Image: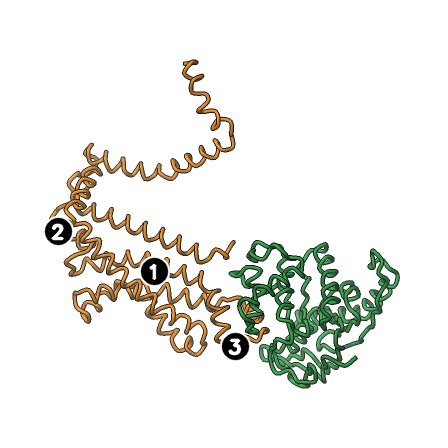
Chain colours: A orange, B green
Amino acid sequence: MSSSTLVKAPVVAPVVADPAKRWHVARIFGNVVTRSIAIVALALVWEIFPRLGLVDATFLPPLSEVLVAWWDLVKSGELWEHAQASLTRSLVGFALAIVISIPLGLLIGWYKPVANLLTPLLEIFRNTAALAILPVFVLILGLGETSKIAIILYACAWPILLNTVSGVRTVDPLLIKSARSLGLGPVSLFQKVVLPAAVPTIFTGIRLAGAYSILILIAAEMVGAKAGLGYLINYAQYNFAVPDMYAGIITISGIGLIVNQLLILTERRFSTWRTS
Amino acid sequence: MTAKIVFENIGKVFQARGTTVTALQEINLDVKDGEFLVIVGPSGCGKSTLLDLLGGLAEPSSGRILVDGKPVTGPGLDRGVVFQQYALLPWRTAQGNVEFGLEAKHVPRRERAAKAREYLDLVGLAGFHDRYPHELSGGMKQRVAIARSLAFDPDVLLMDEPFAALDAQTRDGLQDELLRIWEKTGKTVVFITHGIEEAVYLGQRVAVMTSRPGRIKQVVDVPLLSQSEDVRSDPQFAHYRHEIWTLLRDEVNKARNEELEANRV
C-alpha cells in the first residue's frame, strides 16, 4: 500500500499540491452529480417499476426496451425520416414567423397610429390558443404541409411580435434624447439606437418562439400527417407499438432541449452588453 | 467679447393634466464666447428645460434663442449636450460611443477612430477604449460622455448636472478635469447644477434662477480665485458661496412651501 503510494506520488503531486484547483474540480463534479440525480432517478424508476410489476409493462415498458426500440428506429432510418419531416416544418414556420413578426413589431412599436389601429385586433388573436385555430387551418389549408407550417407560424409569431413591440417601446428615452441632440434623423435614430437597443428583447421572443415551434409541431402532426415525430408517436400508439411511441417522445424532448440550448447560446452572443 | 448665446425673453409653458404650468418666464441672458457660465437654481425651477431649449430638443413658448446670431430651430452639432445619466449606448464600447457623435457628423471612418482615441486620451481614458459602459465606473462613463460631446467639436458644451450622480471625490476630480479641458479647448460652456460650491468653483459667472416659474434672479460674477491648493477653503470662495446661498435660500424655501401646498390640495 505504502509502496504503491510512493510510486504514484510524483504523478499525483501536482494535482494535490493545488488545493484550490482540486476544490474547483470537486465542485464541478458535485454540480454534475446534483444536476443528474433527478434524471438518473427517473431513469431508474422507469426501468425498475415495470419490471417489478408496480406499473403495467404493456403501457410503460422498461426504459431499456424503449431505448432498444429507439435504436432500431435509428438503424432503420425511420426515425431520421420522421425527425427530418418535423424539423423542416418547425424551421420553415419559425423562420417565416421571424421574417413577418420582426418588421411588423418594429412598425407597431415605432408608429403610434399603427399601434392604435392594430392593438385591439392583436389582443383578440393573441388570446386565442393556437391549437383552437388548428381545425380552421386544416379546413382552409387542407391536411398537407401548408396547414402545419401555418399553425407553427401562427404560434411562433406572437412571442416574437410582442417582444419586438415592447423592445422598441422600452428603449431608454434618454438614449433617444441624446441621439436627437446630435441631430440624428429618424432613420439613423432607428437604425443606430432603437434597433440595437431592442435586439436582446427581440431575441427573448425568438427563443420563446423556438420552444413553441417544437411544442405546437407535435400537436399539428397528430392531425392527418403521413410523417413526422408527432405522427410517429400517434401511429405507434394506435398500433400498440408502445416502445416506439416512447422512443418518439424521448426524441422530441431531446430535440426541444437542443433547440432551446442553441437559442440561449445565440441570445447570449447578441446581448453580451446587457448585464444585470 | 461678443455674445455667443443670447436668450431673448424666453418663456416656456407646459400643459399637464389639464392645468397650465409656466416653467420659464422672461429669461434674458447673454453668454459670451468662450465663457464658462453656470446656471444654478432650486430643483424644479426649469433649468433643465432651459438647457433643452438651448439644445434644440424643445421649443420655447415665447421668445427666441440665438447662437452666433442665428435662432435655434432644432438640435445641431454646434452644441454638444452632456446628460447627468451619461446616455451612453450600452452595446458600444467607449470608443464606439465617442465615434457615435462623429458618425452623426459624417466624419470618415478612419478619421473617426483616430479622433475617438484622441478625445478619450484627453479625458484621461487612454487604454479604456474597448470597455463597455457596464465595465466602467460612473465617473469614467461621464468622461466618455464628455469625450463624445467634445469629439465632434461643437462650439458650445451644454452640461445638465453632469456630476450630480457621482460621489464627492470623483466629482472633485472631474471638476478639475473639466476646467483643464475648458482652458485647453476654449469652448463656451453652459453648465447646470443645483450645487452652490460646484457653481462657484467652476463658473466665471453664475446665473441664479428663481423657483417656478423660473426667471433669472441675478447673475454673479466670480472672478478667478487664487490658484491655491485648496480653493474651496479660500475666504473669497466662502464669500461667493455665501452670496449665492443667500440668493438661493429664499427660492428653495418658496419652492418647498409650494410643494407642500400642492400636496395638501
* Disc 3 with disc 2 on a shared chain: yes
- Residue A93, image x and y in percent? 28, 63
- Residue B164, image x and y in percent? 68, 62
How many numbered marks does the figure carry?
A: 3
Which residue is located at x 42 percent, y 34 percent? A30
Left or right of A174, for residue B210: right
| Quadrant of the rendered image containing residue A246 | top left
Residue at the spot of label 3: A185
Which residue is located at x 84 percent, y 67 percent? B224
Tell which circle, 1 or 3, labels the residue nearer the N-terminal end. Answer: 3
Task: Residue type at mark 1: give it.
Answer: Ala
> Dot 1, how many residues are within 10 Å of its Cα: few (below 14), some (14-19), or many (20+)?
many
Left or right of A129, for residue B32: right
Task: Residue type at mark 2: give it.
Answer: Tyr
Residue at the spot of label 2: A238
Query: A49 and A269: which one is in front?
Result: A269
Up the image or down, B42 lies above or below B176; here it is: below
